[in-house]
Image: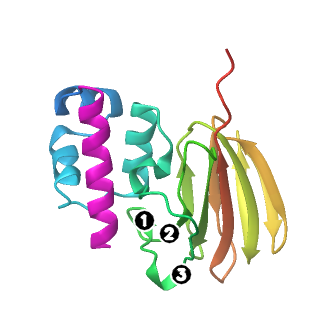
Amino acid sequence: MEHLNKMIASNLAGLRKSRGLSLDRTAELTGVSKAMLAQIEKGKSNPTVSTLWKIANGLQVSFSYFMKEDKVSFIKINKEDISAVEDEEGGYRVFPYFKFQPDRKFEIYTVELEPGCVHGAKTHLGEEYLLVRDGALTVSLDGEEHQLNTGDALQFSGNTMHSYENKAANTASFFLLMYYPEPEA
């Protein structure tokens, strides 16, 4: 987790400084307090999924922008090497596998949702492509529920109000590809 916190800290501070933003202005843009932003930039805070989404939306970057590393010729990822980003209750965990790269326009995660957990996602940029890996998942899009089971998939716009719910007795997991198309001129 410490490596992830340092990466988030470095990327947030670098982005903020490259745009000439003060902590006060960044707090205004993101809705995240100046104190919290300072703690994140120092690597002393473990930001939640919701906090990272607020920052990403406010600064108009992808969720995984803060988790990017230097480019390499190939990438091999072992799950045990990935630190999860969790919601406040710990029932919704995001494992960032392939982080956003500007030349690729996408990022890939696995997500685990504990039984009984409901995660209300923030609207955001891009499109979501979801594939249920294991278990059952209910996805609500603008209030309309879609039941998905192992092997089922769903695509929708990130600017749609959406939430994920696990109504089953076992942990549900799914692959999530976030695609960021070029803005229309």
Check residue 57 for magenta coloring.
no
Residue holding disc 1:
85
Residue holding disc 3:
79
Residue holding disc 2:
93
Name the magenta segment's main secondary structure.
helix
Q: Is residue 131 above or below residue 168?
A: above
Report the quarter where the N terminus lies.
bottom left
Q: Is residue 27 left or right of residue 106?
A: left
Residue visible at 16% across and 46% down in the picture: 38
Do residues under tags 3 and 2 come within 8 Å of each other at their CB atoms? no
Q: Is residue 135 left or right of residue 61?
A: right
The amino acid pointed to by label 3 is Lys
Report the quarter where the C terminus lies.
top right
Q: How many residues crowd mark 3 within 10 Å: few (<14), some (14–19), many (20+)?
A: few
Question: Which is nearer the N-term, disc 3 or disc 2?
Answer: 3
Secondary structure under tag 2 reads: strand
Q: How many residues crowd mark 1 within 10 Å: few (<14), some (14–19), many (20+)?
A: many
Distance from label 3 to label 2 (Cα)?
13 Å
